């Protein structure tokens, strides 16, 4: 399984990857990107099974990234991992094609629950 | 019990949300710091701005304490660079701001988060604002948590 983790904070990317490993994804291969533009480049070079993205990022934010991805018929499961989490933003994420939104701070169980719900094993 | 504005209450709830999770050692009892914002301490800030509210939330401390916080957060303490430390502390404040935003969003549904920023020097506090400062003593060192809001906002 290959997972793309997108966050402008390197520290947060490290934490997301660590917690995914603790959630049982210790055999996964992780790719990283610091914004939506870099993430799109990664996706043009690699097939991935899951995208986890921050929302607020410079250059291209997570929502713009998701919309760009879906406009190219890429149906890879996509989840936001973000400090945002108001009801309006959860709705916007769903309407734009996200499978789930995990609010920071999070635990490995949050990842396990969200990924189980969308059938990512 | 400390009397505080709801902005500061949201700020402290944001800090509590990190305890034992992504920042295992961020444990302590906040105390009101009447002396105001400590001058010349580095730290990170995030803005929440809407049609009716404008808030700045910050975490400042001696740089060595921020370094220890970073090590505690990312699980690594060897040769942390300034970039790694500023990135991690800005993200801590970003997460605190996100929790705080969810707690005060009803007061201004248009509230939006800015990108966090790290300052090595003193923050210039705009006139017409009110600030509250809390001191948090942790096993990693002493931190100061700050909320700055427009003085006219109902807290």
Image (tube, coloured by chain):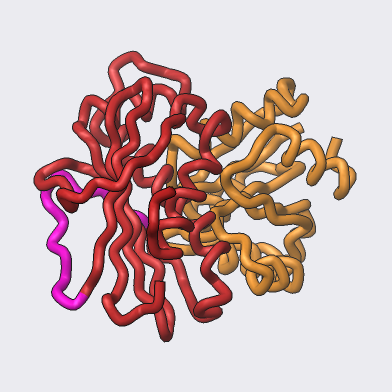
Give above or below for B94 relative to B20: below
| A25 left or right of A60 in image | right
Q: Quadrant of residue B128?
A: bottom left
In front here: B3 or A84?
A: B3
Q: Which residues are magenta?
A: B116-128
Colour of chain B as rendered: red
Q: Say if residue B117 shows up in the picture.
A: no
Give above or below for B5 relative to A113: below
| A73 left or right of B29 in image | right
Residue at image x 34%, y 36%?
B136
Give above or below for B77 relative to B91: above
| B33 left or right of B71 in image | left
Give residue A25's position: percent from left, percent from top: 74, 27
From the rendered image, report the letter of the chain displayed in orange.
A
Give residue B68's position: percent from left, percent from top: 33, 23
In front here: B77 or B34?
A: B34
Residue at image x 48%, y 57%?
B10
Q: Say if residue B151 shows up in the picture.
A: yes
Q: Quadrant of residue A57?
A: bottom left
Q: Looking at this rendering, what residue extends furthest in the front direction?
A: B1
Count of numbered tags = 0
């Amino acid at each position: 399984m290959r997972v793309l983790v997108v966050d402008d904070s390197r520290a947060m990317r490290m934490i997301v990857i660590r917690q995914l490993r603790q959630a049982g994804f210790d055999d996964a291969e992780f790719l990283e990107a610091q914004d939506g533009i870099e993430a799109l480049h990664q996706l043009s070079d690699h097939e991935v099974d899951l995208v986890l993205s921050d929302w607020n990022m410079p250059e291209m934010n997570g929502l713009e990234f998701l919309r760009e991805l879906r406009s190219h018929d890429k149906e890879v499961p996509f989840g936001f991992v973000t400090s945002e989490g108001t009801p309006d933003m959860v709705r916007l994420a769903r309407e734009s094609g996200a499978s789930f939104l995990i609010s920071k701070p999070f635990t490995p169980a949050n990842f396990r629950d969200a990924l189980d719900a969308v059938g990512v094993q | 019990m400390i009397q505080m504005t709801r902005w500061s209450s949201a700020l402290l709830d944001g800090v509590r949300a990190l305890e034992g999770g992504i920042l295992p050692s961020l444990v302590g009892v906040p105390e009101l710091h009447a002396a105001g914002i400590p001058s010349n301490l580095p730290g990170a800030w995030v803005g929440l701005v809407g049609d009716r509210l404008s808030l700045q939330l910050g975490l400042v401390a001696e740089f060595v304490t921020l370094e220890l916080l970073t090590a505690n957060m990312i699980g690594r303490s060897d040769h942390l660079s300034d970039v790694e430390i500023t990135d991690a502390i800005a993200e801590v404040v970003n997460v605190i701001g996100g929790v705080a935003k969810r707690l005060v969003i009803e007061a201004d549904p248009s509230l939006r988060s800015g990108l966090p920023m790290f300052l090595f020097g003193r923050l210039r506090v705009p006139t017409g604002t009110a600030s509250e400062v809390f001191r948090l003593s942790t096993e990693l060192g002493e931190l100061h948590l700050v909320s700055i809001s427009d003085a006219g906002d109902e807290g």
